[in-house]
């Protein structure tokens, strides 16, 4: 369910982005003939009076289509409500509306987090360590019936205390106990259970049982006194997340060779969201806001096939007094699209391989 929750968050952010484009166009009475979530084969389709609404098989994006780009459109080329016949400012509003929608949505997610979940005051360590993930159904942890959310309070007759060292102690005992049965005491739904786990041996001879761990911490929170305070807290958190995100992109550009290894694709993003949902479902507010802000900043970059690339074309048109020749724009956009699709496929394959390798390592 945590994976589905993370995918649902990503899907919602895509819908928000495309709705930004759609409503900005409709607000200006610009014709829209397609609104699609996802790419590839159509799963569901509804034909409205002017616009076709579609849900497609691969939910890794979406698009808003205009009759200008449809060779089969029966609308006259000189129709004043076509996107291409509108002034530069009108088109710029439509193109930038997706980014603006993602930023606004991220802000309201952070306001909702403050109002519904509360604002963290701090945390205190509780006895034991929390299981966040069972990495494989063939792992020793799965064989012993460990589940995400279990609290391991003792292992090999050694109690794991309420400290930051509990996870390190647990890891040390497991690594030194390859192929040796270990008695484990856990707390599941506040009920004590006794299990026995026999760690596998990894390539270096150390024991592994195939789980993800997190400190067992109790976070204390308080709720804003009123809605105005929630908006203020949301604004402060929004400012912090935007600053850190922009700083991260600046570091990526400044030291591309090292930081490019840390760029995450859709598979890794879903995995991160799933882990957050397993440990604390309320963290999906923060996850959604962070990804929404990242999506906005990526889209505003002046790269072909992104919103920023189209805005760059409009800037050139405004300075020249006329657009670049259509064949030049089409060539640049096609090249950019190929590069982006290639990068997307690379990230998906790399992240899938890394997740598989991690799972095999812990088995």
Image (cartoon, rainbow, N blue to C red):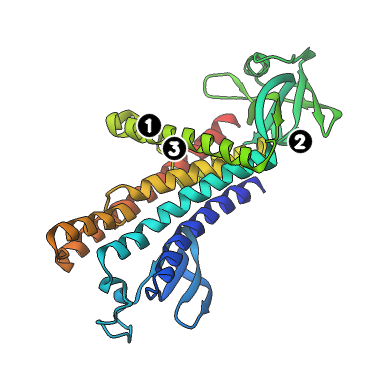
Disc with the residue nearer the chain's start (2 vs 1): 2
Q: How many marks?
A: 3
Which residue in the protein does label 3 denote? 242
Q: Nearer the viewer, residue 1 or 195?
A: 1
Please name the residue shown 12% across and 60% down the image: 320
Tag 2–tag 1 contact (CB < 8 Å) = no
Q: Nearer the viewer, residue 97 or 46?
A: 97
**How many neighbours does mark 2 have within 10 angstroms: few (below 14), some (14-19), or many (20 or more)?**
few
Question: Is 217 above or below relative to 347?
Answer: above
Q: SS class of the residue under badge 2?
A: loop
Q: Is residue 319 left or right of residue 141?
A: left
On-image quarter of the C terminus: top right
Question: Is 190 above or below relative to 173?
Answer: below
**Residue 145: mark:** 2
Please name the residue shown 38% across and 45% down the image: 297
Q: SS class of the residue under badge 3?
A: helix
Q: Which dot, 2 or 1, sits closer to the camera?
A: 1
Q: Position of residue 130 (x, y in %)?
A: 70, 27
Which residue in the protein does label 1 denote? 247
Whole-angstrom CA distance, mark 2 to mark 3, is 41 Å
Question: Is 306 above or below relative to 158?
Answer: below
Please name the residue shown 43% across and 48% down the image: 295
Q: Is residue 92 visible?
A: yes
Q: Nearer the viewer, residue 144 or 217?
A: 217
**How many neighbours does mark 1 have within 10 angstroms: few (below 14), some (14-19), or many (20 or more)?**
few
């Amino acid at each position: 369910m945590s994976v589905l929750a993370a995918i649902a968050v990503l899907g919602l952010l895509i819908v928000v982005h495309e709705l930004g484009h759609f409503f900005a166009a409709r607000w200006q009475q610009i014709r829209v003939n397609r609104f699609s979530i996802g790419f590839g084969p159509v799963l569901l389709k509804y034909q409205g009076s002017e616009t076709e609404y579609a849900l497609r098989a691969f939910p890794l994006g979406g698009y808003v289509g205009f009759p200008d780009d449809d060779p089969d459109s029966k609308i006259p080329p000189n129709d004043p409500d076509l996107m291409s016949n509108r002034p530069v400012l009108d088109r710029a509003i439509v193109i930038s509306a997706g980014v603006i929608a993602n930023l606004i949505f991220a802000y309201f997610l952070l306001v909702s987090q403050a109002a519904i979940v509360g604002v963290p005051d701090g945390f205190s360590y509780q006895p034991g360590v929390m299981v966040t993930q069972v990495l494989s159904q063939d792992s020793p942890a799965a064989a012993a019936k460990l589940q995400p959310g279990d609290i391991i309070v003792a292992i090999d007759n050694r109690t794991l205390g309420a400290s930051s060292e509990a996870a390190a102690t647990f890891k040390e005992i497991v690594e030194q106990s390859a192929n040796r049965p270990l008695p484990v005491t856990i707390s599941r739904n506040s009920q004590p259970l006794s299990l026995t786990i026999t760690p596998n041996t990894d390539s270096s001879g150390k024991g592994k049982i195939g789980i993800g761990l997190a400190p067992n911490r109790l976070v204390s929170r308080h709720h804003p006194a009123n809605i105005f305070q929630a908006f203020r807290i949301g604004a402060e958190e929004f400012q912090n997340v935007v600053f850190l995100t922009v700083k991260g992109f600046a570091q990526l550009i400044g030291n591309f060779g090292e930081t490019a290894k840390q760029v995450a694709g859709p598979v890794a993003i879903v995995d991160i969201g799933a882990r957050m949902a397993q440990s604390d479902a309320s963290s999906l507010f923060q996850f959604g806001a962070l990804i929404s802000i990242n999506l906005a900043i990526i889209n505003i970059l002046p790269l072909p096939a992104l919103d920023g690339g189209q805005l760059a074309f409009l800037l050139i048109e405004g300075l020249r007094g006329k657009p670049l020749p259509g064949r030049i724009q089409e060539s640049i956009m096609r090249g950019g699209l190929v590069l982006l699709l290639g990068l997307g496929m690379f990230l998906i394959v790399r992240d899938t391989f890394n997740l598989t390798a991690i799972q095999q390592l812990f088995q």
